[in-house]
């Protein structure tokens, strides 16, 4: 694993793919890899989110073309809905971004959400940290697009772009909570469609309401299929990143939650599910069975056995 780590730091896509797979599937050595991540190269993370049909993948494609012209090296983590049969990524953004598949400056990885809430993969924080170890300039995370529950990206990304399409124009007022609250930049994609101007005006009003110290959230019109508005979007992202170098409060909250989860996993590491099920099968037949007191007793016995 040490050799793999060194290869990731040199920019090997093959090593990076192997490292991500190890972390995603808890393969041997993955804990060592995570514990030894200490990259001085810290690429900024751009989150692209929004409802299904907003054209997120097309927008990412257009941004990749723009950044390539600026000689940037970019990683894309595309989180897809999971197949209900094998938990693999269902849509496969590698296919949708096939023109970049062999480009040495673009790395694309599809991840399955595997039922995780928030529109992201359960291992997205760890995987993002592994990708940061490689010499990229920008990391783009494109989320599933599941709606207002998709707010976790705000804690992970340095800049969150929320993409909407003209058909959402009449719904903006009902979307002030949830997904509309996480945007650092709004994008009206497919802006050549009918009602695009209505959506744009509604978002501008919303941005005005949410202005802090007179600073409004940018609202950008794009037609990603022909690159219209993409330079303006890239400039808005760059401007936001330049103005916000500090650790966002939402990032601190996300990291605290992740650390809490890791401690819980460590605490439960040596607790046997099979033994739990066996003891529960006996206890549930008792007349005074209580799930909560049983669970407390089982946990105490397991922890005492481990410390003995």
Image: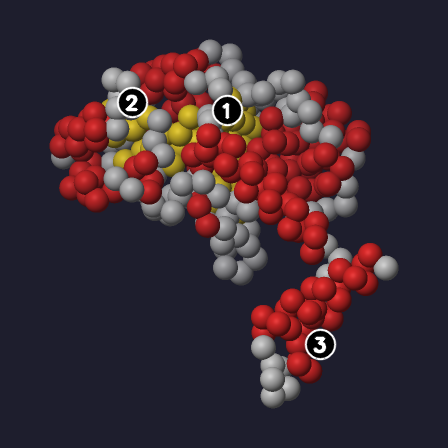
Secondary structure of the residue carrying tag 2 is loop
Q: Which residue is situated farthest in the top direction here?
A: 70
CA–CA distance in space, label 3 to label 2:
57 Å
At x 26%, y 28%, the residue is 210
- The residue that label 1 is drawn on is 247
- The residue that label 3 is drawn on is 278
Q: Nearer the viewer, mark 3 or mark 2?
A: 2
Tell me where residue 233 sits by quadrant: top left
At x 51%, y 15%, the residue is 72
CA–CA distance in space, label 1 to label 3:
47 Å
Q: Nearer the viewer, mark 1 or mark 3?
A: 1
At x 16%, y 41%, the residue is 170
Q: Residue 307 in the image: x percent, y percent?
A: 82, 56
Secondary structure of the residue carrying tag 3 is helix
- Colour convention: secondary structure
Please tell me whether residue 144 is drawn above or below residue 37 in the rendered image: below
Q: Are marks 1 and 3 in contact (CB under 8 Å)?
A: no
Secondary structure of the residue carrying tag 1 is loop
> First in sequence: mark 2 or mark 1?
2
Is disc 2 surrounded by few (<14), some (14 to 19) or many (20+) residues within 10 Å?
few
């Amino acid at each position: 694993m040490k050799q793999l780590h060194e290869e990731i730091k040199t920019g090997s896509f093959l090593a990076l793919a192997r490292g991500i797979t190890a972390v995603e599937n808890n393969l041997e050595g993955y804990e060592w890899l995570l514990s030894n991540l200490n990259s001085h190269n810290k690429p900024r993370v751009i989150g692209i989110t929004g409802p299904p049909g907003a054209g997120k993948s097309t927008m990412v494609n257009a941004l990749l073309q723009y950044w390539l012209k600026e000689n940037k090296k970019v990683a894309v983590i595309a989180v897809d809905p999971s197949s209900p049969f094998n938990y693999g990524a269902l849509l496969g953004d590698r296919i949708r971004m096939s023109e970049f598949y062999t480009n040495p400056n673009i790395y694309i990885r599809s991840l399955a959400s595997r039922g995780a809430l928030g529109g992201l993969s359960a291992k997205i924080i760890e995987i993002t940290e592994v990708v940061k170890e490689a010499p990229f300039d920008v990391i783009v995370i494109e989320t599933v697009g599941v709606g207002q529950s998709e707010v976790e990206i705000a804690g992970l990304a340095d800049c969150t772009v929320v993409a909407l399409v003209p058909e959402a124009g009449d719904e903006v007022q009902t979307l002030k909570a949830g997904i509309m609250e996480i945007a650092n930049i709004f994008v009206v994609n497919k802006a050549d469609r009918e009602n695009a101007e209505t959506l744009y005006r509604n978002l501008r009003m919303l941005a005005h309401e949410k202005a802090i110290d007179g600073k409004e959230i940018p609202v950008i019109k794009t037609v990603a299929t022909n690159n219209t508005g993409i330079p303006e979007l890239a400039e808005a992202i760059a401007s936001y990143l330049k103005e916000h170098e500090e650790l966002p409060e939402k990032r601190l909250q996300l990291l605290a939650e992740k650390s809490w989860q890791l401690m819980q996993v460590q605490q439960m590491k040596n607790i046997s599910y099979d033994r739990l099920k066996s003891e529960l099968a006996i206890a549930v037949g008792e007349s005074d069975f209580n799930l909560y007191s049983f669970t407390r007793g089982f946990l105490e016995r397991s922890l005492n056995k481990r410390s003995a």
